[in-house]
Image (cartoon, helix red, strand yellow):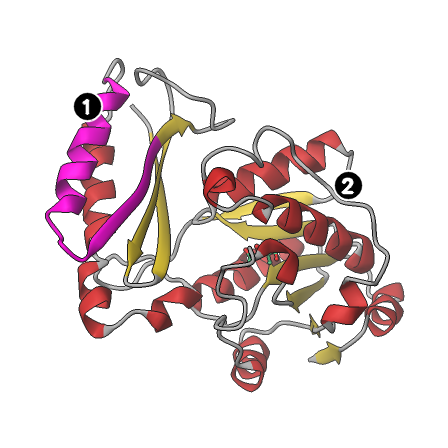
Amino acid sequence: MDICRSTDAMRAWRRDAGRVALVPTMGALHQGHLTLVARARDWLDGQGGGRVVTSIFVNPAQFGPTEDLDKYPRQEAQDLDLLRDAGCDAVFLPQVSDIWRPGAQTHVQVSQLGGILMGRLRPGHFRGVATVVTKLFNIVQPQAAAFGEKDYQQLTLIRRMVADLDIPVTILPVPTVREPDGLAMSSRNQRLTPDDRAAATVLARALDHAAASVNMGTPVSLLRRQIRAIISSEPRADIRSIDIRNADDLSRIAVVGGPVAILLAVRFGDVLLIDQRTAHP
Ligand code: PAF
């Protein structure tokens, strides 16, 4: 597995690499990320072969001033071992100064999708995501890139951005990978106390229950009440948002009329967890 620690090194590697699929990550890798690597590999195999590149970059531009940038887990040696075992071909590990150069003035903003839901809770977050993903696409020049459905708003926004800007990258959505007790895998889970870790399983239970209640014409307010009741039965859970939206474009709906995305943001201690499920009536 090749390791490229600068933009120049990545560009030089890419020149003779042929078809490439990219897995953008912020490190602290777990089985969810390795599933993205496997999806990228499958896609390449279907195209006649190619190389998988994983990027590891904790992107300061997507953290707010009060957020956990310094606390974000960093475990490079372990990440590289996992990627080697997963059959990744190359890793892009740039420095912050390589990606964010002084004097930069250009940003990518997906105006509507970036301002709703998590974009309201985390102002500037999606501008940071859209800009860094565009830069990664420009540096690595992949034909495809894999993103987890767990960050459903991010996935929807990147699909919109790629369509709006005619970026020639096929977006590969990958279903959320869960622990045996249902908790969605996330690098943030490491920061939960044992009690909060146990309590956090309430999210998957609430999503399963809501998904089973989704029928044509079900009022969204009813689904939201049911979800709130289940999550509130867990005293350690601090609900930040419960949203049920059109699964295609995340627009607001009053009643279920097609596929919906159920999106949760809930704090346990000082850790904000998100989880989601799409449901079809
Ligand atoms: O999902 C993530 O880990 C990040 O938002 C991404 C896509 C790697 C951009 O920094």
> What's the magenta region?
219-243
Residue sitting farthest toward the front: 66
Give the percent coordinates (x, y) of residue 270: 34, 63
If the picture is divided into quarters, which one holds ligand 1? bottom right
Tell me the residue that label 2 is attached to: 168
Position above or below: 278 against 269? above
User: Does residue 256 appear anywhere in the picture?
Assistant: yes
Tell me the residue that label 1 is attached to: 222
Q: Is residue 229 magenta?
A: yes
Residue at (83, 65) in percent of width and height: 14
Image quadrant containing the N terminus: bottom right
Type of the residue with mark 1: Leu
Is 230 on the left or on the right of 186, as rendered?
A: left
Position above or below: 225 against 218? below
Residue at (89, 65) in percent of width and height: 15
Dot 1 crowding, Cα within 10 Å, few <14, some 14–19, many 20+: some
* Element on which disc 2 rests: loop
Give the percent coordinates (x, y) of residue 69: 54, 67
